[in-house]
Amino acid sequence: MENLIYYPTFEPQSENWLKYALIYLENFSPIIPVRGNSQLSDLFKQIITNTELVRSIQPTSNQGDRATTKAIKEIELIKEAPERYFFLFNEPNIIQVWSDHRRWNSNLYSEKFNFAFEEYCVNNNFGQPSNVGLRLSEELAGFYMTYLAEEMAFEGRLTPITDVPELDGISSFLRTTNVRQVDEISASQAVIDLHLPRDIESIKIQKFIDFRNDTGISELRASYNSTLEDFYSSVERDFDPHTWRPLMG
């Protein structure tokens, strides 16, 4: 599984997600401006240095422009009747959440948006300028990053991916995610869980790094992903589970 663009943060916040990724992902691309490299954890730097799993990318100004325009348009609709969006954000009034300065604990780097988005957020009390860009709530930053990931994915023929379940729901609503891709990832995690001798949380991540670098593992991963792809293609063709045969035993 490859050609994935990761969002909303520079690196996955779940170590378990990274463990799964080391097993079955060919690679994924987090959105990291040059200035953001100094903010990466030692673990993530180790994975970047010792494996080919991570291929970071940077947004262009045009991608930031388009993401800004789309995000502002959607926010304006939400402002008209925020209560209608409870199902999406699990909040009775997401506008109040975005406007609560006590929740402005996320930095959105200026490379990811244009001045219009900064002006809009400041004028609507959704955030304030910071030394790297904008200081926003985690919820609003994630909402915006859904749009940026979509724009970057479209141009690069990539698929957005996240380890934040709430953003999966938002991207599905905005039709910015590949539902099948999300299903395949969930299926892969379930299969891996079934075959591991113990809880994945109890296994040190270094073992997953070493496993990924073993000779022949890349071929095994490619075969596994091909099998999963074949399975989902069969499902889409309304297959007969009694006659379908996997590519690997």
Image (tube, grey):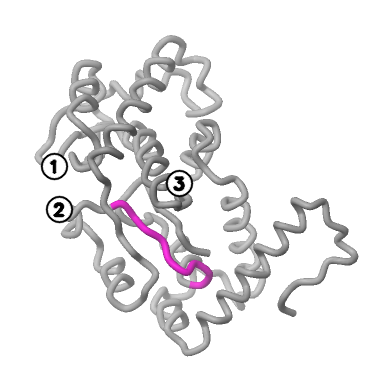
Give amino acid for label 3.
Val
Give amino acid for label 1.
Val
State the image quarter where residue 195 is shown: bottom right
In depth, the one of 133 and 223 nearer the eye is: 223
Which residue is drawn at the image coordinates 81% and 71% (left, top)?
A: 245
Residue 138, percent across and down? 32, 37
Compared across the picture, whether 220 is left or right of 128 comes to right
Compared with 177, 186 (above or below) is below
Identify the residue under disc 3.
Answer: 164
Res 50 visible:
yes
Compared with 190, 137 (above or below) is above
Identify the residue under disc 2.
Answer: 35
Measure the C-alpha gap from mark 2 to mark 1. 9 Å
Secondary-structure class at tag 1: loop
Measure the C-alpha gap from mark 1 to mark 3. 23 Å
Task: Name which of mark 1 and mark 3 comes first in the sequence.
Answer: 1
Compared across the picture, whether 177 is left or right of 95 comes to right
Q: Which segment did they paint magenta?
A: 23-31
Compared with 45, 152 (above or below) is above
Residue furthest right in the image: 242
Compared with 4, 144 (above or below) is above
Residue 132 is tagged as: 1
